[in-house]
Image (spheres, rainbow, N blue to C red):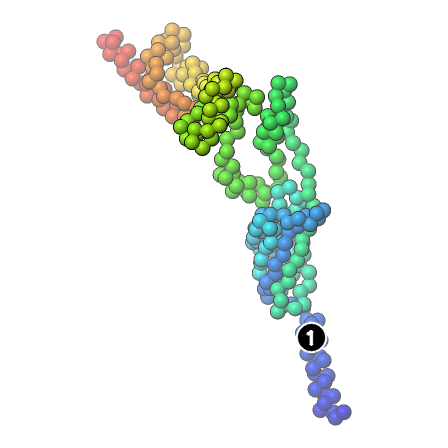
Amino acid sequence: MSLKQILFVTLFLFCFNASFSAPLERDSLISISGQIIQSKNLKPVPLATITIKSSRLGTVCDSSGVFHLKVSPIDTFKVSALGYKAIDWAIPAVRNLDIPPFFLIKMEEISYLLNEIDIYAFGSWEEFKEKLIHTKLEEKNPINKDIIKQLAPFHTKKPNIVPAQYRPKIESPKIWDAIFSPTDFLYSKFSKTEKIKQKLAHKIRNERKNRKISQKYNATIIANATRLKGDELVAFMEYCGSNIKVNENTSDYEVMRQIMEWFEKYKKEKTTTKE
C-alpha cells in the first residue's frame, strides 16, 4: 500500500470516528418525540406537562401522552401529571440526528388523601357516588393547579340536590318529553308514586332556593347596613316589601345596593312626613 493510500485511510477513519464521538454543541437544538406512559400497565398518561428546567419552557402532551419538542441535548425535563409522581428526566445521548428519536417515559401513580365523607343511613349508593365524585383533592404541584384552573370552565354540570330515592323519572314533564320519551312521560303523568316524587323534588329545590335567598337577604343584613333596630327595622322591612328583588343567583353587592337605595327613599319619605 502506498503512502498516499495510507494517509487517505487514516484521514477517513479519523473523520468517521470524530463524527460519532464528538459531543453535540451546547447551543445546538435537536428534535425529539416521546410518550408518557404509566409504569404499571404501560397505558398512556394524557395531558402530562413537560417543562424544560433550563428555560422553563415546555409543552403539554396530547390525549395519547405523545409530545414533540426541540431541545438542547443536555437539557433535563420536569414531567408532571395529575395523579402521578413528578419526575426529572435527562435526555439520553442521541447519535443519529437524521432520524428524530422517540422515547418512552414512565410515571408512577400516587394516592391522594380524600376529605371526610358523611354517609347517612337513609341514603343510597347513588348519593355516596355523587359525593365521592365531587370530593375535592388537594393538589400541591403548581403546574397541576394551573391545569385544573384551565379545565374548571368545562366542569359546568351542577350536582342534583334531590336525593336519589326521591328523584322522579321526569321532574317537570313537558311536551317534548312526550315526543322523545313517551313511555317515561306517560308513567310520570299517571303514576301515583311519580307524582309524589315530583312534589317532593319540587319542595326540596324550593327549600334549597329559599335557604340561599335567606342567607343573602335577612333582618340581620338589613340591620347591619342601615343601623336600624326594633320597630324601626320592622317598619323599614314592611316599607320595602317585595320591592327588593333577590333570588339565589343575586350577588351580595346587588342585594346591598337595593337595600341602600330603598333606605334612602325611606328616609326621605319619613322626613317629608314629619315636615
Name which residue type carries label 1. Ala
Give how far across and how far down residue 142 sits, in percent.
Answer: 59, 42
Question: In the image as oriented, which residue stretches furthest toward the top?
Answer: 231
Q: Is residue 46 left or right of residue 252?
A: right
Q: Is residue 245 visible?
A: yes
What residue sits 72% from the left and 80% below the top? 13
Question: In the image as oriented, which residue stretches furthest toward the right?
Answer: 1
What residue sits 29% from the left and 17% below the top? 265
What residue sits 70% from the left and 86% below the top? 8
Q: Is residue 205 above or below residue 66?
A: above
What residue sits 41% from the left and 27% below the top? 174
Q: Is residue 85 above or below residue 94?
A: above
Q: Quadrant of the C terminus?
A: top left
Q: Which residue is mark 1?
A: 18
Q: Is residue 56 left or right of residue 219?
A: right
Q: Is residue 216 above or below residue 88?
A: above
